[in-house]
């Protein structure tokens, strides 16, 4: 158990608590949840305003990371520890090209999948509260993917861990994709801020590809990893694939 693993588990329990609270409102008083989703702050601060603020702060911390961040996010701010090998440029760009293809495959799958939810909303089969629950469900799944099992990593990206993940900072965009379909300030501010986080990550990836590959950045190698968040996930992934 590393310090970062402990932080992730603690935050997962907080996310489960938020999910459970919103789910209970959804199940027992769906109309009240709908009112909370659209309630302007001028009418008083409610639970959903607090959740919205927490989401915004969470994304801003990815745009302006502090000192205590995962090794995956350190690629955005710290200089890589250069690998000793030379003549790696061609191999690096082949790796980057391969990862780009896989990343955009993930994006296509994600947009198609969530486009179906958008159609259900446009045809009034589901409503705003269903989309909110979907986003909060994604909010929990984000950490499940980091700690236990990630279908994108296993079946599409084929990367070995989150520290090396090409789409590590796409999580917020995925989380708040359903918010695009709800037309109010709170939902759109979440979606478009998450898009800024994604674009910020992509710009860094394009400008500094050497930070994102273990062949040129020794910090990404397993022997130098301090997070060790992959321990449980590797065992679970092997069991799922084996079955």
Image: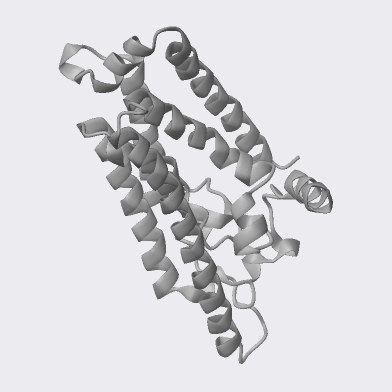
Numbered marks: total:
0
Q: Residue at x 51, y 59 (%)?
A: 106
What residue occupies the far bottom of the structure in this picture?
87
Residue 12 at x, y percent in the picture: 59, 31
Q: Residue at x 75, y 50 (%)?
A: 237
Residue 212 at x, y percent in the picture: 54, 69
Residue 111 at x, y percent in the picture: 41, 52
Who is closer to the viewer here, 16 or 113? 113
Place residue 190 in its image quadrant.
top left
Would residue 76 appear left or right of 228 to someone viewing this image?
left
Would residue 130 appear left or right of 148 to someone viewing this image?
left
Residue 166, above or below 207 = above
Who is closer to the viewer here, 194 or 119? 119
Residue 59, above or below 218 = above
Would residue 168 appear left or right of 150 to someone viewing this image?
left
Q: Residue at x 67, y 56 (%)?
A: 154
Who is closer to the viewer here, 237 or 130? 130
Residue 56 at x, y percent in the picture: 34, 36
Colour scheme = one colour
Residue 228, above or below 101 = above
Query: Is residue 61 in view?
Result: no
Place residue 40 in its image quadrant.
top left
Task: Look at the image and tell me in which quarter the N terminus lies.
Answer: top right
Q: Residue at x 78, y 45 (%)?
A: 236
What residue occupies the far top of the structure in this picture?
28
Query: Is residue 71 in view?
Result: yes
């Amino acid at each position: 158990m590393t310090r970062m693993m402990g932080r992730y588990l603690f935050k997962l329990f907080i996310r489960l608590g938020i999910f459970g609270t919103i789910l209970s409102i959804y199940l027992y008083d769906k109309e009240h949840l709908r009112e909370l989703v659209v309630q302007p702050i001028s009418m008083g601060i409610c639970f959903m305003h607090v959740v919205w603020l927490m989401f915004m702060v969470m994304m801003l911390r990815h745009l302006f990371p502090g000192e205590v961040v995962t090794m995956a996010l350190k690629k955005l701010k710290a200089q890589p520890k250069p690998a000793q090998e030379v003549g790696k440029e061609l191999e690096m760009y082949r790796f980057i090209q391969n990862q780009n293809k896989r990343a955009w495959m993930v994006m296509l799958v994600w947009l198609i999948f969530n486009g179906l939810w958008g159609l259900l909303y446009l045809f009034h089969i589901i409503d705003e509260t269903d989309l909110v629950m979907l986003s909060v469900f994604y909010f929990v799944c984000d950490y499940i993917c980091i700690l236990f099992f990630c279908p994108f990593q296993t079946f599409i990206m084929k990367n070995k861990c989150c520290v090396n993940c090409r789409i590590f900072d796409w999580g917020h965009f995925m989380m708040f994709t359903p918010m695009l379909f709800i037309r109010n300030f709170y939902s759109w501010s979440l979606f478009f801020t998450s898009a800024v986080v994604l674009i910020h990550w992509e710009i860094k990836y394009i400008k500094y590809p050497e930070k994102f590959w273990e062949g040129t950045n020794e910090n990404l190698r397993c022997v130098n990893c301090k997070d060790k968040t992959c321990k449980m996930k590797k065992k679970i992934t092997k069991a799922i694939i084996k079955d």
